[in-house]
Amino acid sequence: MIAPALARWVVSTGDIPVEVRRAAQRHLFDGLGTALGALRTGQVPAAVPVATDLGGPPEATIWGQPDKVSAPAAGLANGSLVHALDFDDTHAGGLIHATAVVLPAALAVGEQVRATGADVLEAAVVGYEVACRVAAAAPNGFHARGLHSTMAAGVFSSAAVTARLLGMDLAQTTNALGIAGSQAGGLLAFLATGASTKQLHPGFASQSGILAARLAAAGATGPETVFDGPHGLYDTLVDGPADPASIVADLGVRWETTRIGIKPYPACQLSHATLDAVRDARARRPFEVTEVVRLTAQVHPDSAAVVCDATRDLTRPASDYAAKFSLPWSVAALLVDGSVGLDTFEEVSIRRPEVADLAGRVVVEITVPDGVAADAPGDVRIELADGTTVTGHVDRSAGGPDNPLTDALLIEKATGLAGIDATPLFAALAVLDDQPDLTALLAVLDSLAPH
């Protein structure tokens, strides 16, 4: 069975290569940067006060807040903060925001037990592997069922991180994974309504995963068939083929932690390749927005179902999140503004008639699926008023493992989000392996957070 095999690796693995640890440090930094951006811009206003009111023993920090709360409460708030701007990383194979469910549990439980920096980093790597592998075992399968894979798979990651840091044994960790499975979910209903539930999903996953592990440590049991079935995760919550055995294939040999992409745009990952292709087209032959007669984008079918869903108005999005999940609108905004940033999705921006008008000239052609959607190429064809046709192409979107952001660009992104130089935070994470606990890292984070 898969859960016991995965649990055995969670509790016993210790030889993590330097390049994997380095990748984890970069992703933890990116996640803290997106959380600082959420704090600075006042995102998810409900999660932090609710988590603060939940209180509990003073175990862990809600970032930017003076008082400690229970680790599950901190996980709820901090998971929501990491994902609030939809600017956090994505694993293409699983289409999951991995850091949003790894980082909150790692720091909250690590702070609770006063774990060393090395222990926290190793627990984070364990979390990354679990999150990515559980999600990638059913590529787009959770989304096809109407569920957010970040929450559906992320709860297992948070449970694994917690089990590792609490020093739980094999049986307890297996039970933690089984218990976590009964808390997997996350409806995609927000796509058509603009509701804030998507921002909350990683917080739910972090909180629930921590609780699942604690319950297992206290003697609660969960089904060891949670991945195999019958009535397991993939039987129940996935539409389409799944390969649960891939979760444990080549564990400790093939590291999914190194295959996570870092976002250059605060929009749905499934639009990124098209956005990059538009930039490529404009670099080949500069043109004005007024010249565009039609822009045709070739889109992977799994991407089209999410960011080109014709059942909602893709040209006049109902909310900032609806705009982030509209490929036509995001493409039009890029052409009008020349860039896509946090201000692109502010209320005044998404109401602009000139962007809506241009979005109406964006046509989508569904391609034959080849590989996973988040790693698909981007291709656009732009017809101009003078009869000229301009094309743009990228093999895959920027920021992924085969086209990574440099450290300098990563720091620049976090600095822009935080509104203050984030270099000290990058430096603090670079030496996390050598720290006796999380005190120094949390002090640097607190110095950058708005109060």
Image (cartoon, helix red, strand yellow):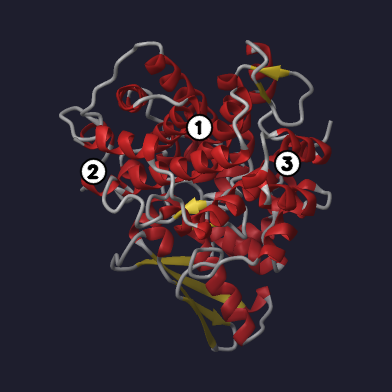
Pinpoint residue 428: horizontal percent, then vertical percent. Answer: 73, 47
Pinpoint residue 449: horizontal percent, then vertical percent. Answer: 79, 37
> 402 and 369: which one is in front?
402
What's under tag 1, amino acid-wise? His
Q: Residue at left 28%, top 34%?
A: 237
Residue 209 appears left or right of 244? right
What's under tag 2, amino acid-wise? Pro
> 279 and 419: which one is in front?
419
Give the label on residue 244, or none.
2
Q: Residue at left 61%, top 54%?
A: 26
Residue 115 appears left or right of 11? right
Pinpoint residue 438: horizontal percent, then vertical percent. Answer: 68, 34
First along the sequence among labels 1 and 2: 1
Q: CA distance from mark 2 to mark 3?
A: 36 Å
Q: Dot 3: within a 10 Å radius of its alpha carbon, few (fewer than 14), some, or many (20 or more) residues?
A: many
Of the two numbered discs 1 and 2 in the rendering, the one whose residue sits closer to the viewer? 2
Find disc 1 in the rendering and name its residue: 201
What's under tag 3, amino acid-wise? Leu
Q: CA distance from mark 1 to mark 3?
A: 18 Å
Find disc 3 in the rendering and name its residue: 36
Answer above or below: position of 135 versus 183: below
Q: Residue at left 48%, top 45%?
A: 125
User: Is there a contact, CB below 8 Å, between mark 1 and mark 3?
Assistant: no
